[in-house]
Image: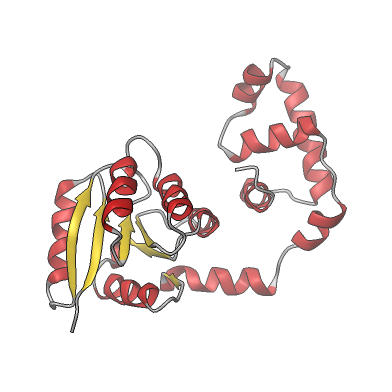
Amino acid sequence: MEKLTVVLVDDHQVIRKGLRLVLEDKGEIEVIAEASTGEEGIEICTRLGPDVAVMDLSLPGISGVEAIKRIKELNPKQRVLALTMHEDALFLEKVLSAGGNGFVLKRAADEELLAAIKAVCRGEVYIDTGLQAYLVTRALKPEGQAKSRVTVELTAREKEILQLVALGHSNQEIAEKLIISVKTVENHKTRIKEKLGITSRSKLVRYAMDQGLI
């Protein structure tokens, strides 16, 4: 049986070595290359076209999410599996929005990683078992997203502030970037939340992602 080919992208050599041992142990997978940055991962995937690229999200230079996005832009058929320590569902959404084919937590990087690689090679989307319940909950309770997409109109300034909030900037940082007062930022955020019917930052980030603001 022909082996599945994999490229590992992680900035820690020890982790790459451990992953290689795990993946090649049963003789079904061959790690054909390794990369320590997102840029290297993009170049190697473009040049070698592995069956699957296993991509860490926390990388020096461009992030793993951005690397996934660029790889998929260059070759939409390239399968990319995110492997990360981040258990936050927002990271999952970012990976899927970037075109990623799967999401596995590093703490499960053994049999589950092998299963994930095989699944994405079959054309499936693989989500770590620890986050599957989140997707089911979101599908059953969309939290008014359809309504917000159709009826809510944010001003250009509100979109600008929402984008900065979603990117993790504080009120003070936003005020300095836009050359406005902190109070003005707070007022805008209040209006944004009222318009969208959203109170938590995580839901604001999710909305910003859905709207293509990040």
Q: Residue at x 45, y 47 (%)?
A: 70
Q: As drawn, is 133 to the left or to the right of 175? A: left
Depth order, front residue of 5/26: 5
Q: Identify the residue shown where x is 55% and y is 68%.
A: 134
**Residue closest to the far right:** 151
Q: Residue 27's spot in the image, x, y percent? A: 13, 77
Q: Where, by quadrant of the figure, is residue 166 drawn?
A: top right
Residue 149, percent across and down?
A: 79, 55
Which quarter of the rendering shows the N terminus?
bottom left
| Image location of residue 76, percent across then percent down | 47, 60
Residue at position x 39%, y 73% in the image: 120
Residue, x 51% and y 60% (percent of image)? 96
Image location of residue 110, percent across then percent down: 23, 70
Residue 100: quadrant of the picture:
bottom left
Q: Is residue 86 left or right of residue 207?
A: left
In which quadrant of the rendered image does the C terminus lie? Answer: top right
